Amino acid sequence: MDSVTSNNHPDVVVTGLGAVTPVGLTAADTWQALITGRSGVDRITQFDPSGIPVKIAAEVKGFDPAQYIDAKTAGRLERFTQFALAASHQALMDAGVSVDGNGERIGVVMNTGAGGTALVERETKVLLERGPRRVSPLFVPMMMPNIGACQVSIALGLRGPAITATAACASGVQAVVDALRIIRDGDADVVIAGGSESALTPLSFAGMANMRALSRRNDEPTRASRPFDLDRDGFVFGEGAVVLVLERREHAAARGARMYAAVRGGALSADAFHITAPDPDGESAARAMSRALQRADLAPEDIDYVCAHATSTLVGDIAEAVAIRRALGGHADRVAVSSPKSMVGHLMGAAGTLSALAAVMAIHTGIIPPTINLDRQDPKCDLDCVPHTARHTTVRAAIANGFGFGGQNIVAVFARA
């Protein structure tokens, strides 16, 4: 039993999944790509990268918003909002949830790291080159970070809580933790929990490149994202959306829903260390993992898989490895740890929900996705990082880590339903 459930809070399960990612336009396609080790990284096409030392990205390819949204509405939505709507439609359909007459008991948590910054960049250019009268009157409602949650609520008729939190690259895990709280507080029976991001712009790339945060392996794009590898040189910028449907167990059972996994607990902490670098001693990140396990009423020995945040940065991967060892102790040597970012790049605000999807599906299928491009493992990242090939094994419980700029650490724990 969950330690929070023992205080008369309900069990919560995952009943639906949706995804629009660089390796698949559905959750099923994305999962298949992850377990087969297929990379979605290539030369960027959304703008001309001339003058910027980074030429590669993990873009969503072949996405057609018309499958989910009429043309007029799509034209008034930023790409990150289109992704959010598409993944939410998929997830709700996968869950088999009927909204009719039940909208007030269904909520939305749709998080993002950058929101409509791509629009800000475009409209700033319009302002400077063509004058204030040519700035779109829809500029503000299109660029607001919370517009993804609001548009999902409007499109699907969901009248429960609709909220957005921005926790940088930890935003996706934050969505899961907040959705769990909403259900346990009794404010909804079902919550769409997602992260969505599309911020592949010249300004973003220039800033990240000048920070030396991005990989410059331009000639080998599919080999550029290499978490835990000794030759890693930064992360690969990505985009996409991933959504989970969280549901009160009794509600799901009453309608005979499939339960992928249970959401057992979550926790947050802050490094209070640096605006971009993680605390190298991993103390706060480990505390978030330990507290999440405590709230899930699980011991380190119950965990079979950690879906790592591991972005392929020099200091970040080491700090997370240190934190995992601090949190799991001697059991860290017996836990599989992998990073889907080796295939999809860093989806920023959607990265955490992708990790949650990987953790949930590892439990559901007994397959742990690999860390590709792990040719020479960094001895400072001395964990079982599942190199190259997926692993078939029993996964009783799993951790999804999310760490963000500014020292935000957010962890969710999942277990068999």
Image (cartoon, rainbow, N blue to C red):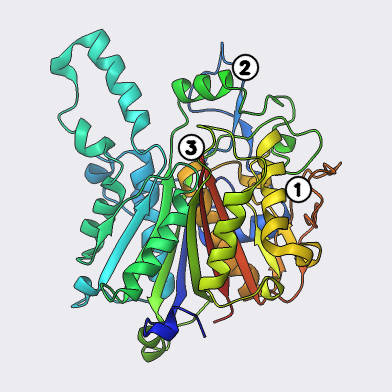
> How far apart are labels 1 and 2 at the CA level?
24 Å
Can residue 218 be spotted in the picture?
A: yes
What is the quadrant of residue 298 in the picture? bottom right
At 63% across and 35% down in the image, what residue appears?
235
> How far apart are labels 1 and 3 at the CA level?
28 Å
- Mark 1 residue element: loop
Residue indicated by mark 1: 372
Sequence order check, earlier mark of 2 and 3 = 2
| Residue positioned most to the top | 129
Residue indicated by mark 2: 53
Tell me if residue 114 comes above or below residue 134 in the rendering: below
| In front of the other: 34 or 167 | 167
Residue indicated by mark 3: 406
- Mark 3 residue element: loop
Image coordinates for residue 5, horizontal then vertical, percent: 43, 82
Question: The disc labelled 3 sits on which kind of residue?
Answer: Gly
Sequence order check, earlier mark of 1 and 2 = 2
Q: Is residue 390 left or right of residue 293?
A: right
Tell me if residue 105 comes above or below residue 84 in the rendering: below
Image coordinates for residue 9, horizontal then vertical, percent: 37, 81
Please count the marks in the image: 3
